[in-house]
Image: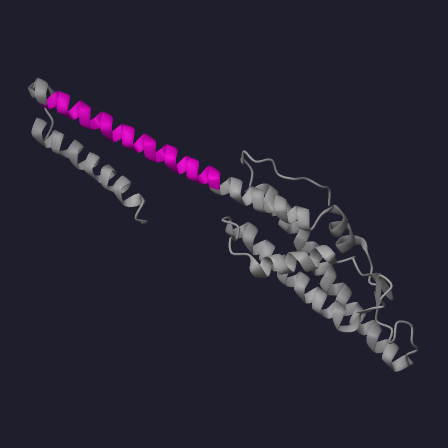
């Protein structure tokens, strides 16, 4: 219980004690034919106060839950601005060729940096778990990719030494094996991303903030 919640909880406890006290004053066990005007008024007053406090607590909890849900949707929308439709399409459909565009995975690089600095995770644990898993797998993919790919200085990156140098058959086979592993990790990241979108749409329904949409 936080310091801010303490007075509110104290009021709830007080209302319950007052209600019980009024019943004791009336008589216990209750015999309605022996109700006096004063005791009856006290009981009704305590009951009204108790109901009012409980209703206020219900309204407060509903408001808090709505704010939490809205915060999660705002975060989800921001993530879809980073990993936008184009980046999502690249993750799911582009192959790892000999040459790749320097900007092909810009969104992934940004989302990994965002996750590393993120101080406010999703309130919804299931959504957060999928998001964290996607960011970790994206980091694994980028690390593996740029372990063998370097920029040519002309807007592309390649595994070829010196940009377009010759490699032996043995070196080529090794590179192809590494690229196969990179493709596997990318597929995993793509699958997790799809699940993240699906789970977020399921778990964050009911928000007053509109969720961004794009087809995946």
| Colouring | one colour
Give the mark count: 0
Query: Observer-nearest residue: 164 or 212?
Result: 164
Q: Quadrant of residue 31?
A: top left
Residue 41 drawn at (x, y percent): 14, 21
* Residue 60 x %, y %: 38, 35
Front position in the image: 13 or 4: 4
Could you tell me residue 211's position as x and y percent?
62, 38
With respect to residue 95, does 65 lie above or below? Answer: above
- Does residue 177 appear in the picture of this structure? yes
Left or right of residue 188: residue 202: left
Quadrant in the picture for residue 207: top right
Residue 120 as seen in the image, left or right of residue 96: left
Quadrant of image for the C terminus: top right
Q: Is residue 188 above or below residue 84?
A: below
Residue toward you, 91 or 153: 153
Displayed quadrant of residue 200: top right
| Region rendered in magenta | 39-67
Task: Inspect the magenta stretch and tell me whether residue 83 lies in it.
Answer: no
Residue at (33, 32) in percent of width and height: 56
Q: Is residue 24 above or below residue 9?
A: above
Left or right, 167 with respect to 109, comes to right
One can see residue 97 in this view: no
Residue name at image x 23 percent, y 41 percent: 10
The residue located at (42%, 39%) in the rendering is 64
Q: Is residue 44 magenta?
A: yes
Q: Main secondary structure of the magenta part?
A: helix
Q: Residue at x 80, y 70 (%)?
A: 149
């Amino acid at each position: 219980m936080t310091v801010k919640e303490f007075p509110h909880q104290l009021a709830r406890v007080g209302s319950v004690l007052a209600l019980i006290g009024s019943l004791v004053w009336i008589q216990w066990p209750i015999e309605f034919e022996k109700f006096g005007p004063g005791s009856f008024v006290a009981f009704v007053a305590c009951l009204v106060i108790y109901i009012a406090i409980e209703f206020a607590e219900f309204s407060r909890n509903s408001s808090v839950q709505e704010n939490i849900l809205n915060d999660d949707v705002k975060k989800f929308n921001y993530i879809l601005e980073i990993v936008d439709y184009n980046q999502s399409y690249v993750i799911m459909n582009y192959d790892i060729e000999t040459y790749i565009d320097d900007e092909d995975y810009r969104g992934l690089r940004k989302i990994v940096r965002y996750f590393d600095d993120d101080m406010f995770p999703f309130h919804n644990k299931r959504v957060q778990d999928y998001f964290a898993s996607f960011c970790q797998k994206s980091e694994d993919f980028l690390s593996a990719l740029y372990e063998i790919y370097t920029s040519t200085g002309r807007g592309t990156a390649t595994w070829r030494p010196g940009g377009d140098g010759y490699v032996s058959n043995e070196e080529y086979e090794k590179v192809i094996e590494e690229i196969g592993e990179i493709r596997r990790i990318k597929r995993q990241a793509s699958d997790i991303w799809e699940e993240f979108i699906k789970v977020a749409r399921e778990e964050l329904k009911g928000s007053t903030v509109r969720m961004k949409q794009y087809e995946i």
